[in-house]
């Protein structure tokens, strides 16, 4: 009877240890993919012509029963961010897993530059399994946090990556990087928020 009890305790201990190890790995993966999503969004926002605008309908109705329309900047608009998130996870094919030889910490880096220039890669693992793993994590993050991600990028911030991945989603809480709470503050408000409808 004692041996059976001891065996159960050993199995319980091993199961707990394995689950904790897998949980830590998942945390590292999801934090890394969150950083990738934030980097990609920031890049796409930076590529939009600041003169590009979007015409949206207001919820307000004038005395004649007509809905007013107004123009807002396309960059950081809800429409723009939703379009980017819709295609985001396909971009995971452009990333590989990099392991720091000193700490063993994993991160995810682009295997090609956006400008087409050569990229120097070291300590990098590229495989279909890694791409699939990144894509799955990306899809899971966007499904669970799409509204939070959009809210994070609707206004310009000092450090949008840390704001999104630590403050908003909590996917990188406990990350070793230094983090200043003042990063949560916005640098400037965006044009009127697009809480109305899609463009006309």
Image (spheres, rainbow, N blue to C red):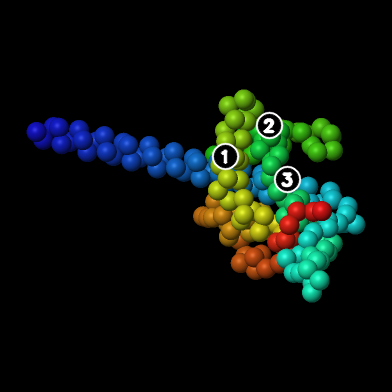
Q: Are marks 3 and 2 in contact (CB under 8 Å)?
A: no
The residue tagged with tag 1: helix, strand or loop? helix
Q: Are marks 1 and 3 in contact (CB under 8 Å)?
A: no
Which residue: 57% across, 36% down?
A: 136
Residue that appears at 80% across and 54% down:
199
Residue 149 seen anywhere in this rendered image of the structure: yes
Total marks shown come to 3
Give the residue at mark 3. Answer: 84
Q: Residues within 10 Å of mark 3 (few under 14, many from 20)?
A: some
- For label 1, the residue is 137
Above or below, 82 against 117 in this view is below
Q: Earlier in the sequence, mark 3 or mark 2?
A: 3
Q: Look at mark 2 in the image and give the residue it sits on.
A: 93
Mark 1 is surrounded, within 10 Å at the Cα level, by few (under 14), some (14 to 19) or many (20 or more) other residues, namely many
Between the C-alphas of marks 3 and 2, the distance is 16 Å
- Give coordinates of residue 111: x percent, y percent: 72, 33
Q: Residue furthest front?
A: 64
- Outermost residue, right side: 51
Task: Give 136 or 21, whichever is nearer the viewer.
Answer: 136
Tell me the distance, in whole angstroms, between the alpha carbons under discs 2 and 1: 13 Å
Nearer to the camera, 99 or 60:
60
Examine the image and state in which quarter residue 121 appears. Answer: top right
Residue at the location (59% across, 40% down)? Answer: 139
Residue 124 in percent (x, y) is at: 65, 31
Residue 69 as seen in the image, left or right of residue 125: right
Residue in view at x 70 percent, y 48 percent: 82
User: Which tag, 1 or 3, sits closer to the chain's start?
Assistant: 3
* Residue 23 image point, x, y percent: 44, 42
């Amino acid at each position: 009877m004692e041996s059976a009890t001891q065996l159960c305790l050993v199995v319980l201990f091993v199961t707990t240890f394995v689950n904790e190890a897998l949980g830590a790995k998942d945390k590292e993966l999801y934090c890394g993919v969150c950083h990738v999503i934030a980097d990609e969004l920031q890049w796409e926002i930076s590529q939009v012509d600041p003169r590009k605008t979007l015409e949206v309908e207001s919820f307000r109705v004038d005395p004649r029963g007509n809905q007013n329309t107004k123009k807002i900047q396309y960059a950081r608009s809800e429409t723009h961010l939703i379009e980017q998130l819709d295609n985001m996870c396909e971009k995971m094919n452009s990333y590989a897993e990099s392991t720091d030889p000193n700490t063993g910490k994993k991160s995810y880096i682009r295997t090609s530059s956006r400008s087409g220039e050569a990229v120097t890669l070291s300590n990098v693992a590229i495989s279909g399994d890694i791409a699939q793993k990144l894509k799955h994590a990306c899809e899971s993050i966007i499904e669970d946090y799409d509204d939070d991600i959009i809210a994070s990028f609707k206004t310009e911030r000092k450090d949008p990556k840390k704001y999104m991945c630590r403050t908003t989603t909590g996917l990188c809480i406990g990350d070793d990087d230094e983090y200043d709470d003042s990063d949560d503050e916005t640098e400037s408000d965006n044009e009127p928020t697009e809480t109305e409808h899609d463009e006309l």
